[in-house]
Image: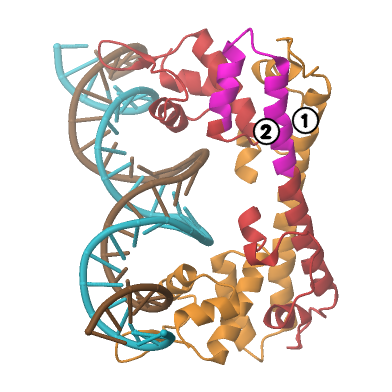
Chain colours: A red, B orange, C cyan, D brown
Amino acid sequence: MNIGEASKASGVSTKMIRYYEQIKLITPAHRTESSYRTYGDNDVHTLQFIRRARDLGFSVEQMKTLLALWRDRSRASSDVKAIALEHIAELERKAAAIAAMTKTLKHLASHCHGDERPDCPIIEGFADTLEDSGTGVPSKFGLANVV
Amino acid sequence: MNIGEASKASGVSTKMIRYYEQIKLITPAHRTESSYRTYGDNDVHTLQFIRRARDLGFSVEQMKTLLALWRDRSRASSDVKAIALEHIAELERKAAAIAAMTKTLKHLASHCHGDERPDCPIIEGFADTLEDSGTGVPSKFGLANVV
DNA sequence: TATTGACCTTACCATCATGGGAAGGATTAC
DNA sequence: GTAATCCTTCCCATGATGGTAAGGTCAATA
């Protein structure tokens, strides 16, 4: 099948399929005489695998490892689990950062009248010192770059 | 003071200070005869404002608006609150997406032995069909692009 | 058969916020 | 006076994705 059909079947855009080939996440597709890429069921299966890993927030780099582990039938399940647990930890770190931001913002917003008057604790909070949101992230790193 | 001192005083890197000037988030700094940028207390105050807004996850575009509102003493507090609430909603959307990924991954990981044996429900879960994580996000959009 | 529309190809550019580094000039400290 | 530390601008890289343009291919239809 052509790249368009493979895209529909896998849920990965044609743009990304070509990109994944370019960065060697997937092996180069076979070509017809007129240079059209062609895909078989196996290829689509791989693309679906990638699609699902992406949906779970894995990076391309992690997916390279996961694909290698997928194809290696003799690898230990602990190898896979280690990557998953590491990724879970990263997701939880991001969640904590977002929760800290949300908490601070909600606190500020709750003290803002939200009417036509100009005084606003939100913007004053930006201009003055904000209380520690309690992530334990050293503030010199900020929070945004963690999300 | 020079850009280095302003950076230390505000917590914004010199790289970013120049960048913010370039994209017109801040007004061009005054220059010495030898083209060095110089900053006063007011400028540092603005940079601190930016730093705190960034730490709360606001985008540059949002910060442009926030800075304008900060300087406009006659604006309604509802204008500020609206931006804050919108941003809170976006943060909560991201948090939900991350929570959904975490939930799915933890579920898969909990069924993985994590030993030397090769069978692994995690990687099999990627290869086969994953159950709906329950975000209500149409799966054609994926989750990763939401985070 | 000729045309049309839907596909495919590559190549380049944009995003967003940030950092790295090079080449060269200015200032400061000793 | 020299060395170290600043500053300047300019260009490049990131990660994952989309857009667009210029051109080739294929299948169906008039």
Residue closest to the eye, A143 or A107: A143
Q: Chain of mark 1?
A: B
Q: Secondary structure at mark 1?
A: helix
Residue closest to the eye, A48 or A90: A90
Q: Chain of mark 2?
A: A
Q: Which residues are magenta?
A: A62-91
Residue type pointed to by label 1: Thr
Query: Which residue is rendered at x = 63% and y = 62% of the image?
Result: A141
Determine crowd level at label 1: few under 14, some 14-19, many 20+ residues with C-alpha closer than 10 A: many
From the image, tell me which residue sits under label 1: B104
| A16 relative position to B33: left or right | right
Query: Which residue is rendered at x = 29% and y = 87% of the image?
Result: B34
From the image, tell me which residue sits under label 2: A56
Do the residues under discs 2 and 1 have CB atoms within 8 angstroms?
Answer: yes
Asked if badge 2 and badge 1 are on a common chain, one would say: no
Residue type pointed to by label 2: Leu
Q: Secondary structure at mark 2?
A: loop
Residue closest to the eye, A75 or B111: A75
Query: Which residue is rendered at x = 61% and y = 88% of the image?
Result: B72
- Among the 4 quarters of the image, the one containing residue B10: bottom right
Q: Residue B86 at what x, y percent from top left?
A: 71, 63
| B39 relative position to B81: left or right | left
